[in-house]
Image (spheres, rainbow, N blue to C red):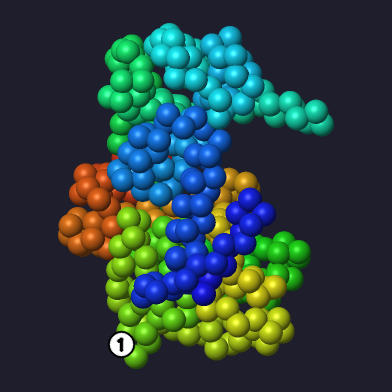
Amino acid sequence: MGRTTVDSKEYRIHNKSDKPDNIVEKDNKIYLECESIEKELPFFLRSYFAYLKSNVLPMSRLAYLHDVKFFMNYLINETELTDSKDTKHITADEMNRIVAADINLFIDYCRKYIVDNGETITIYENSNKTLARKKSSISVLFKQLYRDGIVENNITDGFDPIRVPKPGEREIKALQDDEVMIMLDAVTTGAELTAHERSYWEKTKLRDKAILILFVTYGLRLSELQQLNISSFNFTRGEFKIYRKRGKESIMPLNRSVQMVVEDYIKNERINVIQENEAAEDALFLSLQGKRMTDRAIRELVKKYTSIALNTSRKSGYSPHKLRATAATSLIGRGNSIFDVQALLDHEQVTTTQLYASHKMNVKRDLVNDMEWELERKDDK
């Protein structure tokens, strides 16, 4: 029996599935957040809500609903397109009077806007990728309103295009194999850590190493790693279970390195956290307080150790997603089939995996190493 809190109310989740409680609780928290936002929006959007529920992933549904709520607030606070004082009471007639130019102005507003809460002023700036998602959210909304006969015209054809870099246009960021070894040396020995960081490292080094090894071996998504439990692992059979996007379960084989570091952490470090905090969580990776580690804590951990590997500032370290890219490029660089790597990383399209295949990690370095003009000039003298 799981519990979660939304809008100051405690919801009890009676889990009759074979999924762990933490997975079910996370899914239901997203579901309840979506339901809460829908209650703040006009009732005539119910077909749009139904479309999102049936056709997009839960996190995408939540993002779309946030975008629509933001758009409704924009109409109220930044335009004269509605007389309503709150998002719930914007009318269908007011939506029908909106034209494509109004949406284009909204997207332009989203590029950079200011929020003043009375105490602080925050300037928000969005990338083209974020703007494209907001445009998609609003496009789907108006297409649905047109299909339902709530607006008279399909105005989406008049939306200005937003250019998002095509796959392959941007540099793939991933650690090289020698940098992975530097990272693992740092987490093993505490090298290059500050005195403050070392005080925590003494208590978490086995946990941190297990996290990094899992990322670079399997290319796990952050959510997949964060949700791992002790019960996810069957060391006798040499495998563990993860829960993918779209609710899929996947069995992953354990290699000797992974089994060694995970068991070392469980037996020699995690047990101390459990005893000190009287915690009884099934969560694999625990904070020093005995709670499941948060996404943010794992993200900061990864940035710290990758920054050492890259010899850069902590702020410039890599995210867990770039360790996913590291796993992909390393696996392909070792001659593994693109289709096998696609299956391991759970890429929906093989074209995504092919991006990493075309990314030859040392090709630029090899090219410029053959063009040592100044050294060759000196050698000739």
Residue 177 visible in the shown view: no
- Provide the residue designation for mark 1: 237
Residue 201 in which image quadrant: bottom right
Which quadrant of the view contains residue 298? bottom right
In the visual, does 41 lie left or right of 372? right
Determine the secondary structure under disc 1: loop
Q: Position of residue 36 (x, y in %)?
A: 54, 45
Residue 124 appears in the figure: yes
The quadrant where residue 72 appears: top right
Residue 143: x and y, percent?
Answer: 31, 24
Q: How many marks?
A: 1
Report x, y in % for residue 245: 35, 56
Image quadrant occupied by the C terminus: top left
Q: Residue at x 50, y 67 (%)?
A: 13
Against 323, is 257 above or below? below
Q: Is 269 rendered above or below residue 218?
A: below
**Residue projecting furthest to the right:** 119
Residue 114 vs residue 336, the one in the foreground: 114
Identify which residue, 136 or 329, lies in the foreground: 136
Tell me the kind of residue under disc 1: Arg
* 2 left or right, relative to 191: left
| Residue 237 percent across, percent down from the top left | 30, 87
- Residue at image coords 30%, 36%: 167
| Residue shown at 60% from the left, 19% from the top | 84
Would you call the spot at circle 1 few (<14 residues within 10 Å), some (14-19), or many (20 or more)?
Answer: few
Q: In the picture shown, does residue 348 fall above or below 105? A: below
Q: Nearer the viewer, residue 157 or 177?
A: 157
